[in-house]
Image (tube, grey):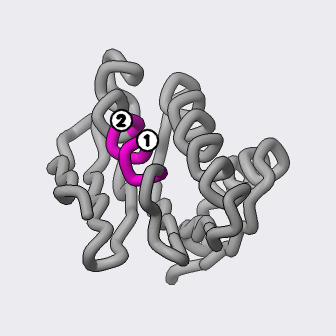
Amino acid sequence: MIKPLRIEETEDTPKVLLDQENGTFEITGRSFPEDASKFYFSVLSWVEEYAQEPSKETNFYFYLDYFNSTSMKQFIELLIRLERISETGKKVKIIWTHSKNDELMAFKGKEIENMINLPFEFKIIE
């Protein structure tokens, strides 16, 4: 089992928690780092390593208030890696959470869902 990855939230980067032992996979907050590729490098590397021996089931949560286009590109890269895990017969599900009045985040989640071959669950929070 690989060591958990924890990145604390800042003004322009999300909190990231990837913990195989506890089954916690989440990105929370706002994502508009100056260099999204650099910020998400460790996240993508962790998922690559996790893909070598994934859990039987992976539920990946997105709790986002805002993200820019370069972050979206990194999310797609992340989801492509998760797709590869699902192709090995493991269960992978994306849980896209947004507030009730945030139509933009709901739309962005649907947009990403249409690009990726993984089951999405949409959760609305008050």
Magenta-highlighted stretch: main secondary structure? helix
- Residue type highlighted by circle 2: Ser
Q: Are marks 1 and 2 in contact (CB under 8 Å)?
A: yes
Classify mark 1: helix, strand or loop: helix
Disc 2 packing (10 Å; few <14; some 14–19; many ≥20)? few
**Which residue is identified by label 1?**
48
- Residue type highlighted by circle 1: Glu
Residue 36 point in image, percent of width and height: 39, 23
Image quadrant assignment for residue 53: bottom left
The residue range painted magenta reads: 44-51
Q: Residue furthest right?
A: 114
Identify the residue at image location x=58%, y=52%.
82
Mark linked to residue 93: none
Residue 65 in sight in this render: no
Q: How many marks?
A: 2
The quadrant of the picture occupied by the N terminus is: bottom left
Q: Tell whether position 28 is magenta.
A: no
16 to 73, vertically: above or below:
below
119 to 107, vertically: above or below:
below
**Which residue is identified by label 2?**
45
Residue 45 in sight in this render: yes
36 on left or right of 93: left
